[in-house]
Amino acid sequence: MKLAADLHVHTIASTHAYSTITEIARHAADIGLSAVAITDHGIALEDSPHIWHFEIMKSLPRELFGVRLLMGVEANVQKGGTLDMPERILKQLDWVVASMHKSTAVMDSPADVTEAWLKVIDNPLVDLLGHIGTPRYVCDYEAVVKACAEKHKLIEINANTFRVRPESAGNCRKVAELCRRYEVPVCVDSDAHFHLHVGQPGGAGEMLEEIGFPEELILNASYDRLLAYLQNRPSR
Ligand SMILES: [Zn+2]
Ligand SMILES: [Zn+2]
């Protein structure tokens, strides 16, 4: 599988990642990507950048070395489905991933997780539900995918998950099967923490190939599809 864009990438602004925006864009250009979304963690996580990081992103160039840059965030979903980022800042950003992480999403049951995702899906400022296959956050995937179909949200199949949380693979496969059934577009993202990992679909790509997932439902396998999404999304 060849990606045209990678829509979930971390920079040195998250302290557990190791590359700059410039290094990421340079590498993306070298491997022929058309676009990259810069998505450091929202402000509630231990390694998050200061809120000023997100305030100032609007002044950065949207293209480097011929690669389109989407300035974004991986916002933290909290119990009840609220996000850890002010709406005012989300509105300024080009791309919003919402994900659940151990220290910021304390859920008591799969029902809590489902409820939180449904609230996130109702948020017009969110583009993409990040790494929803994480075993800690098992939920009613069918309800979540159906709601994404209704509200035109995207679901991520996260390559990093297959490297660092291989026990998620079965859940990711279930989610992908549901996305195919309900025709919900997915984004295959590296969630790279180092620039040489950007653009690599890894195990996520292999799994989608294995199940014969339709290419036309992989949003970021085509730059034209990504552009059409950005132009047509109702939220901005
Ligand atoms: Zn994450
Ligand atoms: Zn991430």
Image (cartoon, rainbow, N blue to C red):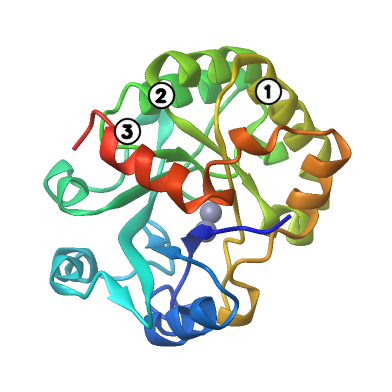
Image position of 46 with respect to 165: above or below: below
Q: Earlier in the sequence, mark 1 or mark 3?
A: 3
User: What is the number of the mark on residue 152?
Assistant: 2
Q: Is residue 26 visible?
A: yes
What amino acid type is highlighted by mark number 3? Thr
What amino acid type is highlighted by mark number 1? Arg
Q: Residue 125 appears at what percent x and percent y?
A: 26, 36
Q: Are marks 1 and 3 in contact (CB under 8 Å)?
A: no
Q: Residues within 10 Å of mark 3 (few under 14, many from 20)?
A: some
Q: Secondary structure at mark 2?
A: loop
**Viewport quadrant of the N terminus:** bottom right
Q: For residue 61, which quarter of the picture?
A: bottom left
Q: Mark 1: is the Cβ under 8 angstroms from ligand 1? A: no
Q: Is residue 17 visible?
A: no
Q: Which residue is mark 3?
A: 82
Q: Which residue is mark 1?
A: 180
